[in-house]
Amino acid sequence: MTPPDASHNRWSDLDRPPLNATALRRGLLRPDTLWASLEVVESTGSTNTDLAERARAGAVTEGAVLVAEEQTAGRGRLERSWTAPPRSGLFFSVYLEPGGIPVERWGWVPLLAGVAAATGLATSAGVDMSLKWPNDLLVAVAGEERKTGGILGEFAGDGIVVGLGINVSLRADELPAPTAGSLALAGAVSTDRETLLRAVLRSMEHWYGAWRAADGDAAASGLQAAYAAGCATLDRTVRAELPGGASLVGEAVAIDGDGRLILSTEDGLQQPVSAGDIVHLRGAAGGLT
Ligand SMILES: Nc1ncnc2c1ncn2[C@@H]1O[C@H](COP(=O)(O)OP(=O)(O)OP(=O)(O)O)[C@@H](O)[C@H]1O
Ligand SMILES: O=C(O)CCCC[C@@H]1SC[C@@H]2NC(=O)N[C@@H]21
């Protein structure tokens, strides 16, 4: 006898159960907490696009969370795409309105999301997590650094939409690129997406509260130090591929108060990098391979 869902592969329903929005709301939406609403949609183009549209229309309040089981036009930084099979990971965006905080400090919000996601996932999935500047989430798969998550922050309306894509149960044959990984491939003790999402959102609430309480000062709130402690880019020789095509090689020596990566180059200069792609090069400074 043929089961009614024979067209699905065996992973779709057993290993990738749907999210329970009611349970998530019960655990996260409480009076006096940051998270004000949580919606789970079956499929959409991009949760960032959707929340940004709502923010521009004034149709969303701070603390809104939009989660999709599947994205058909997921977007990454630098006009790239974000692709993953339905329910293989967490694809969600949050809307934050740090009114009163000087806008030049808002650039810390996506970095804050990276610290929160890395901390929340390390605890809930039991996997060592690190950050590649600015905010890729890295895990080790068979001793190799792999990207298991990415973060896209976009100004919209009076606030900022921060979208997170986290590869949870992706198998090796499903990876969108050789550089990608997943929590499962990194040996996660749990791949329960509700547990992971709750942990990330709670950690984000903690860091956002601390950052706001310090008036957006990343040093005073401890955020700058937490970011540096989790950042795998620091103390490495890296190549920064800058917008416009130029590139810069140097040792990553610090994250400054504006969240920029400081490279110490061969000519002895300290060059701040505020946007671009970082490639971690092997070997110590001067010993590139
Ligand atoms: N789920 C994911 N996990 C990790 N990395 C991802 C994921 N989805 C997309 N990426 C990465 O994001 C980038 C997507 O960029 P882009 O849209 O330019 O695609 P591409 O595969 O690099 O090139 P193109 O689509 O132009 O052929 C790639 O580096 C890809 O590896
Ligand atoms: O690594 C990157 O370049 C950032 C990837 C961000 C992906 C997430 S998935 C949820 C949200 N919606 C999007 O379209 N993008 C972000």
Image: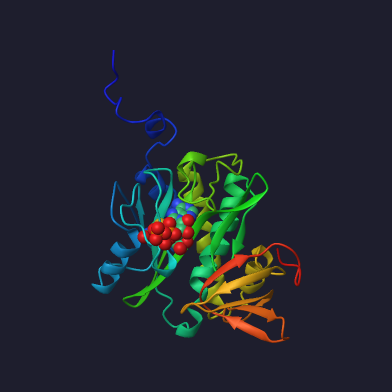
In the image: residue 178, left or right of residue 86: right
* Rendered residue at 74%/63% (across/down): 283
Residue farthest to the top, as pictured: 1
In the image: residue 51, left or right of residue 230: left
In depth, the one of 10 and 111 nearer the eye is: 10
Q: Position of residue 149 (x, y in %)?
A: 50, 55
In the image: residue 286, left or right of residue 222: right
* Rendered residue at 65%/44% (across/down): 142
- Colour scheme shown: rainbow
Ligand 1 quarter of the rendering: bottom left
Decide if residue 93 is in sight here: no
Decide if residue 95 is in sight here: yes
- Residue 7 position (above or below residue 110): above
In depth, the one of 3 and 64 nearer the eye is: 3
In depth, the one of 139 and 224 nearer the eye is: 139
* Rendered residue at 26%/23% (across/down): 4
Residue 163, by quadrant, is bottom left
- Residue 32 position (above or below residue 214): above
Q: Position of residue 19 (x, y in %)?
A: 38, 42
In the image: residue 109, left or right of residue 283: left
Residue farthest to the front, as pictured: 289
Query: Where, quadrant-wise, is the C terminus in this rendering?
Result: bottom right
Query: Where, quadrant-wise, is the N terminus in this rendering?
Result: top left
Q: What number of labels is visible?
A: 0
Q: Position of residue 28 (x, y in %)?
A: 44, 53
Q: Position of residue 160 (x, y in %)?
A: 39, 72
- Residue 16 position (above or below residue 127): above
* Rendered residue at 29%/46% (across/down): 42
